[in-house]
Amino acid sequence: MAKLIIVSNRLPVKLQEKEGELQFKTSEGGLATGLGSIYKQDDNLWIGWPGQVVEEEDKQQQVITELRKESMSPVFLSEAEIKEYYEGFSNETLWPTFHYFTQYAVYDQQNWETYEKVNQKFCDEILKLANPDDTIWVHDYQLLLLPSMLREKLPDSTIGFFQHIPFPSYEVFRLLPWRKELLEGMLGSDLVGFHTYDDMRHFLSSVNRLVGYGSMHGWINTGTRSLLVDSFPMGIDYEKYAQTAASEEVEKRERIYRSNLKANKLIISIDRLDYSKGIPKRLEAFEKFLEKYPEFHDKVTLVMLVVPSRDEVEKYKELKEEVDEMVGRINGKYSHIDWNPIQYFYRSYPLETLSAFYRMADIALVTPMRDGMNLVCKEYVASKHDQTGVLILSEMAGASKELSDALLINPNDINQMVEALHQALVMPVEEQKIHMKSMQESIKRYNIHHWVSMFMDRLSYVKIKQLSMATS
Ligand code: G6P
């Protein structure tokens, strides 16, 4: 039976060793949480890095055996590969460029060469496990060269590619010294997907200007084959979030947390520690809010959960210091003996804890400078079983294209964020419910299952269309 092979840099679990014993923990980030419920069906398989260096051969064998039981297969990376391919090219070159932080981008030839080698390594691992009629679905910016590498070895196979982060405007993309190779890598796919129409438009424009292929309704003809480019806004596992939030366990947790907080109004913010998430600007806005609306002192608390991420990368280390300093300064200035304006947690949390925070939060403050989609805001909405609560959402998140019932803000406009916070805090419950209900309907309908089937259906359609183009 033909299977679906999902490929991404990171597996949905990460390996940890405790007292010599192997353990697997759930990975962070939209990709892992988003696709987590899909890969275990049928004979499907997820191939990726298990999140740790494993050098000894017998330990590698043990990891392979354990992961296989859970429909996963590892690609092992060395220390040097992690440094140059993952921290280096993926996260110091592509990530800042694609998120419009071009001043942070590092251009390093050695990192590029390792990026190519590791993409080839992924290709070799896939070839060991794939049958010619399998569908291979490659994910994200760490593996942009992989579709063409696979196409070379499996010319007739079905290859989909989905990018979870933004695709920048041509003017930004062309800053990359390896821009043409990257595009050619992606063009090995049958279907290239992005979250938004704008990402797709930017990609088509870069392909046209840098590789010379025009497009018609998203179809690109390379001279030897045709492929389609389209947008597929990713959804969440709505029922999982709704049911967890409605569970007794989560209700109990909410009661405990509430009894420990003096403030009766709660603002939640949850992100990985990443400069694309706009954490310092968000803190600046909250500080200004406290200054402008002193009547809310004691009454409102910002619960800020920050999940550690890429902490070996310089810009992330710097950001950690900046956030620590800002939180300390704001709390130092405004705290009372029994009230802290900001409750700051730097660690990752299990779903039940996140769910309790979502459930009890009057406001979710989601203010990225740039975000491919942002699933946190969707998780918040799905968790509001009584349909109260207000979502403040950055226009720079892909999700803002779907969630027009949120209070949309420009994350560079501090005053606008201050007023949005005030507006959200005084919004009548009936008004909150109208907006929340409408957002819930849309997120429930366009859930993760819908997203997967839209992408897969379109991929099958591309294969049929290619055949009819070849015979006509
Ligand atoms: C984003 C990316 C993913 C990535 C995740 C976590 O969601 O789109 O590809 O896995 O961040 O980042 P990390 O570097 O820890 O894998």
Image (cartoon, helix red, strand yellow):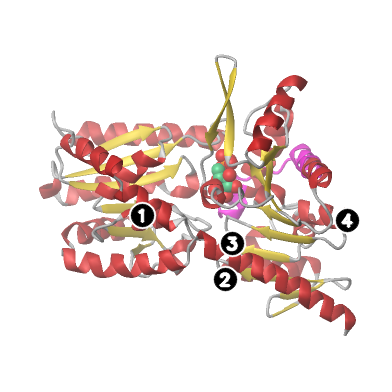
Q: Amino acid at mark 4?
A: Glu
Would you say 53 lies left or right of 380 here? Answer: right
User: Is the residue under label 3 in contact with that under label 1 (CB below 8 Å)?
Assistant: no
Bounds of the magenta segment? 95-120
User: Is the residue under label 1 in contact with that under label 2 (CB below 8 Å)?
Assistant: no
Indicate which disc, 4 or 1, sits on the residue closer to the N terminus: 4
- In the foreground, 332 or 350: 350
Q: CA distance from mark 4 to mark 3?
A: 26 Å
Q: Position of residue 219 (x, y in %)?
A: 73, 76
Indicate which disc, 1 or 3, sits on the residue closer to the N terminus: 1
User: Which quarter of the image is occupied by the N terminus?
Assistant: bottom right
- In the foreground, 351 or 294: 351
Assess disc 4: are there few (<14), some (14-19) or many (≥20) residues with their C-alpha within 10 Å of its C-alpha.
Answer: few
Q: Mark 2 sits on what residue?
A: 197
Q: Position of residue 107 (x, y in %)?
A: 70, 44
**Was residue 116 drawn as part of the magenta stretch in this picture?**
yes
Q: Mark 4 sits on what residue?
A: 152
**Was residue 326 drawn as part of the magenta stretch in this picture?**
no
Q: CA distance from mark 1 to mark 3?
A: 20 Å
Quarter containing ligand 1?
Answer: top right
Q: Position of residue 158 (x, y in %)?
A: 77, 62
Q: Amino acid at mark 3?
A: Val
